[in-house]
Amino acid sequence: MVDINKGFFMAQQPTFLQHFRSFYVQNKFNDLEQAIEYFAVFGQSGWTIDKNKPLLDLIESKFLKNYAYIHGDITKITQSNKITHALLSAIATGDRRMFSSFKRARISREEGDRTVDFLYDNGLIEIEYSTELPLYEEDHISDKLNFMHAYMRFWFAFISPFYKNIKEGNYKEVKERFTNREQGFSDLIFEKLCFELLKKSFVDDPVVKVGGYWDKHAEIDLVAKTKSGKLIAGVCKYSQAKVKKTEWTKLKEKCDLVGLKPDIIVFFAKNGFTNELKLLKSDTVKLFTLKSLKMLIEEVSNKDLLTYMGKKY
């Protein structure tokens, strides 16, 4: 049983994949792209979604029309603290790095550290670490902050900053802001699903660690290690364009720059690959498309689904 209004699942916390699978099945999706984009907005809320309605219409009926009630539930946890709300909006709209989020929220390091502790202790965020240490210690940059719940990320990116207009029934700015950023807002969800697919794809030599890599010089979407010690580096592209061979070149350059020597390179692409990149496919260069993600939602039974106990909007 999952109650979104009590402690945000502190102990036996469902995994991201459990949440996504439940969302997909319970709302009867049959299109992965649509499910990803709707999950980026409503994921982990437990609300029933009519997939036949446009996303903007659902945002209005679920979030905007119920602003006062949802705001009240959220502030029970955040204690209506302005610094807390500023930092959450900074995480939702920025690069998620801790110190740049402090700067974006216009708060001091001391205020930021204290707020991060509060948010972490209350189950609102998690801290993400680079999967590998930088070659040189001085190249390290701050860890990243992730929302534990997709719908909370959406709230603090598009709802909370425009509360004055929303309370007056003016939704224009919210809709324009979301429309302008919608294309990139699902990237993070796609990336997380790619991590999950990678874990399921390496059966004979299981993946024991997977995440992103970043330092002062470069950022790599996916870096993983297998049980035998093989290093995997990859690119996750959630865009309309096919992934080109130039992405392979860029990834190799980044790996060289930061001192990583991958044994296997993987590419995940929403809309496939150019023929030039397909020619590189081998045991050491693996290509996955959106269709590949179907593996994650196959054979889901009722016992695998989550039951949400929080309020439904």
Image (cartoon, rainbow, N blue to C red):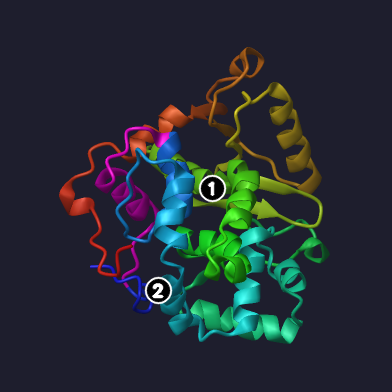
Residue in the image at 57% along x and 36% along y: 238
**Residue 282: quadrant of the picture:** top right
Lower sequence index among marks 2 and 1: 2
**Residue 237: quadrant of the picture:** top right
Looking at the rendered structure, the number of numbered marks drawn on it comes to 2
On residue 69, the disc is: 2
Measuring from the top left, give residue 172's x and y in whole percent: 60, 54
Measuring from the top left, give residue 49's x and y in whole percent: 33, 49
The residue carrying mark 1 is: 225
Amino acid type shown at disc 1:
Lys
Residues packed near mark 1 inside 10 Å, few (<14), some (14 to 19) or many (20 plus):
many
- Per the rendered image, the range of residues in magenta is 12-32
Give left or right: position of 294 versus 121.
left
Q: Is residue 15 a member of the stretch shown in magenta? A: yes
Q: Nearer the viewer, mark 2 or mark 1?
A: 2
User: For the C terminus, which image quadrant?
Assistant: bottom left
Q: Is residue 132 a member of the stretch shown in magenta? A: no
